Image (cartoon, rainbow, N blue to C red):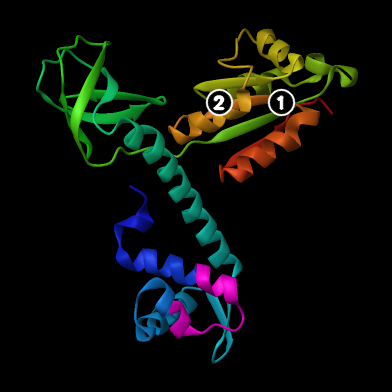
Amino acid sequence: MIDILQSKSGITKFQILIEVAAHQPNVRQKEIADKIGVTPQAVSEYIKELTAEGFIHSDGRVRYRVTKIGVEWVLENAADMKRYAKFVMSDIISHVSTWTAIADEDLTKGEKVYLHMRDGLLYVNKYDKVDATGTTISDAQKGEDVGVTDLVGMIDLETASITVCKIPRSERGGSKNINLERLRTLAGTKAYIAAIGVESLVALKRIGLVPDVMYGAKESIVEAAFHGLSSLVLVIDEEVPTIMNRLETDNLEYELVDLAIQ
């Protein structure tokens, strides 16, 4: 469950910051109140709180601007909500009656189980008590797929991290011109590895690894991130702007590492 959805005040502050950003610097509190469904007095109090917290700067009675800290807070929470909404759309709405999970232990039909995400896959068991629960629709042995219904609660997703490794094209040395030790270290920190370009594929082979995905890698790492799975993606240098743009469009956090030997 993302933090902002756990309190009415958090949601209201988020909405007010959005409205201030849209109409700054001349902000009409009554218009904001009418739009988000609270009283003008409440908007006034929230703006005071947001100003005290450093999210809003005031240079006059009705002149407000969202600060850099405020913008970062809005973007961070917007990214969390986007990930949450995508998870709801893909894994809840589309499977509202029954989910399919992997049994962590032998289970019998009608048992209450707990659902949790691990390495991008949904697992169920009777002992790992978390917020999300359901009921098995059939017997299942450990490691088998099992249907789960009567779902209650929210599945906790880990925040995924993405490391983008820039690999030089062959005319600039290709896989022969990269820091293999650093690549080996980075690969050891991620459960999911993708490659874009032949140079990237060969670089992984040089350290004894095969990528989990090569074709459709951009979509794959985004999908993995929305399921809480961190990834390492090797990208030929000319494709780096494209994948950075894709990750930023989906509000996914990433770090860029240049593996070329200088």
For mark 1, does the 10 Å Cα neighbourhood hold few (<14), some (14 to 19), or many (20 or more) residues? many
Q: Quadrant of residue 115?
A: top left
Q: Secondary structure at mark 2?
A: helix
Q: Position of residue 213 (x, y in %)?
A: 58, 17
Tell me the quarter of the picture where residue 197 sits: top right
Q: Amino acid at mark 1?
A: Val
Q: Is residue 75 positioned above or below 47 on the image?
A: above
The residue at the point 28 percent across, 41 percent down is: 154
Which residue is labeled 1 in the image? 235
Asked if 14 appears above or below 89 in the picture, the reply is below
- Residue 206 to residue 151: above or below: above
Give the residues in magenta: 18-32
Q: Amino acid at mark 2?
A: Ser
Q: Residue at x 78, y 15 (%)?
A: 175
Q: Residue 261: horizontal and vertical position, in percent?
A: 81, 25
Name the N-terminal-most of marks 1 and 2: 2
The one nearer the camera, 249 or 74, is 249
Where's residue 245, x and y in %? 68, 41
Graded by Cα atoms within 10 Å as few (under 14), some (14 to 19) or many (20 or more), the crowding at tag 2 reads some
Residue 188: in magenta span: no
